[in-house]
């Protein structure tokens, strides 16, 4: 696993056109627009993999998330990043995320990134990376809706899930 501080990310403009690369700390420090992938992983019963991020994460340490995913590395496609991130975070091989939609996320201050959304079904055990995941469980949509009102969730994941639910109802 690459040291996150040394990982080169794709930097893009507000139309998602590549304009260069920068390290993760540079991207966060300078508020550069970059690419991320979000994968909603369900088990065969429809429950959603939900986890608490490790306390050592650079963004939103210790917050909860209902997506696995992360940044798109330099030289990597969104689709390849989705597979890599899902397999790394779940500790599995052979997952096949299906693309959903993409949107531009902004925290309203200075952090902005494109979120390419995927969904996958995983029928097997998971062994999440301890460097990434502090706790995990499979939650029903009802349980997740309740936790969204009780727990601190990553803001981009909260927005992504809102858009996911909206896309299903339209």
Image (tube, grey):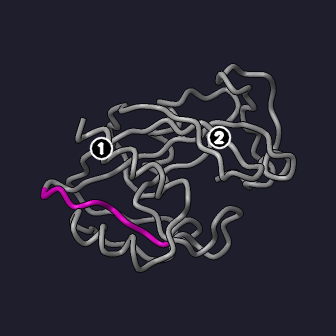
For label 1, the SS is strand
Determine which residue is flagged by label 1. 120
Find out whether residue 49 is within the magenta segment: yes
Q: Residue at x 77, y 49 (%)?
A: 110
- How far apart are labels 1 and 2 at the CA level? 22 Å
**Image vertical order of residue 75 relative to residue 123, above or below:** above
Determine which residue is flagged by label 2. 113
Q: Position of residue 99 (x, y in %)?
A: 37, 31
What label does residue 48 carry, if any? none
The local crowd at label 2, few if under 14, some if 14 to 19, many if 20 or more residues have their Cα within 10 Å, is many
For marks 1 and 2, give the one nearer the viewer.
Answer: 2
In this view of the protein, which residue sits in the foreground, 36 or 23? 36
Q: Main secondary structure of the magenta part?
A: strand
The local crowd at label 1, few if under 14, some if 14 to 19, many if 20 or more residues have their Cα within 10 Å, is some
Q: Position of residue 94 (x, y in %)?
A: 33, 41
**Image vertical order of residue 131 relative to residue 162, above or below:** below
């Amino acid at each position: 696993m690459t040291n996150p501080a040394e990982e080169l990310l794709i930097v893009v403009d507000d139309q998602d056109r590549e304009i260069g690369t920068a390290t993760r700390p540079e991207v966060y420090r300078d508020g550069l627009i970059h690419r991320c992938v979000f994968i909603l992983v369900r088990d065969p019963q429809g429950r959603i993999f939900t986890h608490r991020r490790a306390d050592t994460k650079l963004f939103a340490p210790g917050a909860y998330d209902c997506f696995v995913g992360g940044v798109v590395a330099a030289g990597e496609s969104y689709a390849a990043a989705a597979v890599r991130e899902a397999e790394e975070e779940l500790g599995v091989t052979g997952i096949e995320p299906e693309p959903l939609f993409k949107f531009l996320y902004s925290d309203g201050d200075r952090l902005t990134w494109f979120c390419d959304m995927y969904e996958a079904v995983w029928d097997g055990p998971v062994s999440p990376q301890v460097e990434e995941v502090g706790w995990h469980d499979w939650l029903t949509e009802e349980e997740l809706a309740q936790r969204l009102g009780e727990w601190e969730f990553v803001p981009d994941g909260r927005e992504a899930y809102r858009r996911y639910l909206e896309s299903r109802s339209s």
